[in-house]
Image (spheres, rainbow, N blue to C red):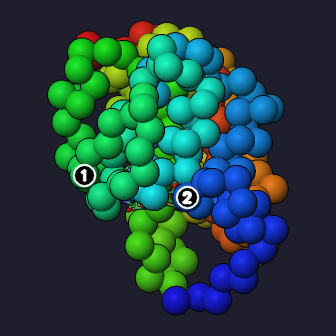
Amino acid sequence: MAFEPKDRFFHKAKSEGFVARSAYKLEELQKKFKLMRKGDFVLDMGAAPGAWSQIASKEIGPQGKIVGLDLKEISVKLPNAKFYVMNAFEFDPKILEGRNINCLLSDMAPNTTGIRNTDQARSFDLCEQVVKVSDEYLSAGGHLVMKIFEGPDVEKLIKDLGRRFAQTKRIKPEAVRKGSFETYFVAINKKDGPSKV
Ligand SMILES: C[S@@+](CC[C@H](N)C(=O)[O-])C[C@H]1O[C@@H](n2cnc3c(N)ncnc32)[C@H](O)[C@@H]1O
């Protein structure tokens, strides 16, 4: 495993009760783009250990609801969140309980092999699956955030999102580790409604 120094975000997360430093990535994106509002229904894909859901939980308040999924068990307890062990490629819409999503979050990352092309291609496959779930269940006017490992496929993804959302931003939050090739897409205001209910 690569050496990961405990930086200021690690210590901040510890002192503020977040289960991972990744909380500050979503916090920054939320501040900039106002992606979630009180009462929203949020799907958090790749939610473990639960830091993004902790941020989302505060933003949507007690009237809102988060459904999170991951390959791994999530142990964090939040009053307005329910978590499932589920592979994103076997997405079961039953977990949405008939609701459409207002904000779709994906911080999913494949297990890395160290072979950049392979890792990037796997990350792109995850993003394509997120776009599929967005097509099917994200409301018109809804927002999407997803992580991708930078590489040649990024341009295709920008085009895919550009067709579906009013605005697409590519951004590296401050909490992304130096030298990391991950980046985030924030897609704002979905043009069409969900193709499934
Ligand atoms: C960087 S972590 C997410 C951190 C999380 N956002 C947080 O703040 O706590 C990436 C997660 O993606 C999950 N993941 C990778 N592939 C997945 C898949 N096919 N389906 C569901 N989750 C997946 C991993 O298990 C891992 O927990």
Ligand 1 sits in quadrant: bottom left
Across and down, in percent, residue 60 comes to: 56, 22
Across and down, in percent, residue 33 comes to: 74, 28
Any part of residue 97 in sight: yes
Label 2 SS: loop
Q: Nearer the viewer, residue 121 or 30?
A: 30
The label number, if any, that marks residue 68 in the structure image: none
Across and down, in percent, residue 22 comes to: 63, 56
Q: Nearer the viewer, residue 68 or 151?
A: 68
- In the image, taking residue 118 as reference, residue 6 lies left or right, namely right
Determine the image quadrant of residue 58. Answer: top right
Residue for badge 2? 19
Label 1 SS: strand
Residue type, numbered disc 2: Val
Mark 2 CB in 8 Å range of ligand 1? yes
The residue located at (32%, 42%) in the rendering is: 83
Residue for badge 1? 85
In this view, 139 is above or below 174:
above
